[in-house]
Image (spheres, helix red, strand yellow):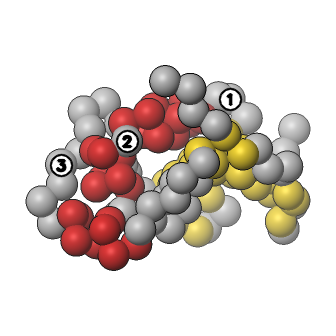
Amino acid sequence: MHRSWRDRHAQKVDGAIIDLARKPDFGMSTPWAYKHWQNSREVPGIPYVQQDFRGQKLHNELERPVFEKFVFLARIKTWLLEQKEVAAALMSGSGSTVFAVCRQT
């Protein structure tokens, strides 16, 4: 199945580079994510731990139900975290954008 993606350009914020490059052509309903949060399970092998970046704690509780439904979004986050220039990666809000905060090189 072909999925269409919208790529966004990187933006510089307080010296960090925010890369919003992975946005599929669909969004997620915030009410849906909250409704399914309580009974959702973590996808095995996907990091859900809080990430620290420049004194900020980054975590998104809504990743669990969304990643359970759309595992490929979880795999994008994992792939981003494996890149040496990425300091943190997570889903934005209730999804479906997955973004990375990159280290300056």
Q: Residue extending furthest left?
A: 39
Could you tell me how far apart the alpha carbons at marks 3 and 2 are, in whole angstroms?
13 Å
Of badges 3 and 1, the one in the foreground is 3
User: Relative to 64, is 77 on the left or the right?
Assistant: right
Q: Where residue 1 sits: x, y (%)? A: 49, 24
Residue 101 shows up from this direction = yes
What SS does tag 1 mark?
Answer: loop
Are discs 3 and 2 less than 8 Å apart at CB? no
Q: Nearer the viewer, mark 2 or mark 1?
A: 2
- Circle 2 SS class: loop
CA–CA distance in space, label 3 to label 1? 28 Å
The answer to whether residue 83 is above or below residue 51 is: above
Per the image, the residue denoted by label 1 is 84
Q: Residue furthest front?
A: 1
Frontmost residue, 45 versus 29: 29
What is the C-alpha distance between the residues marked 2 and 1? 25 Å
Q: Amino acid at mark 3?
A: Arg
Element class at badge 3: loop
* Label 3 vs 1, first from the N-terminus: 3
**Residue at 41 percent of width and 68 percent of height:** 29
Going by the numbered disc 1, the residue's amino acid type is: Lys
Kindly identify which numbered label has been placed on residue 70.
Answer: 2
- Label for residue 41? 3
Residue type, numbered disc 2: Phe
Q: Residue at x 67, y 62 (%)?
A: 54
Does the CB distance between marks 2 and 1 fall below 8 Å? no
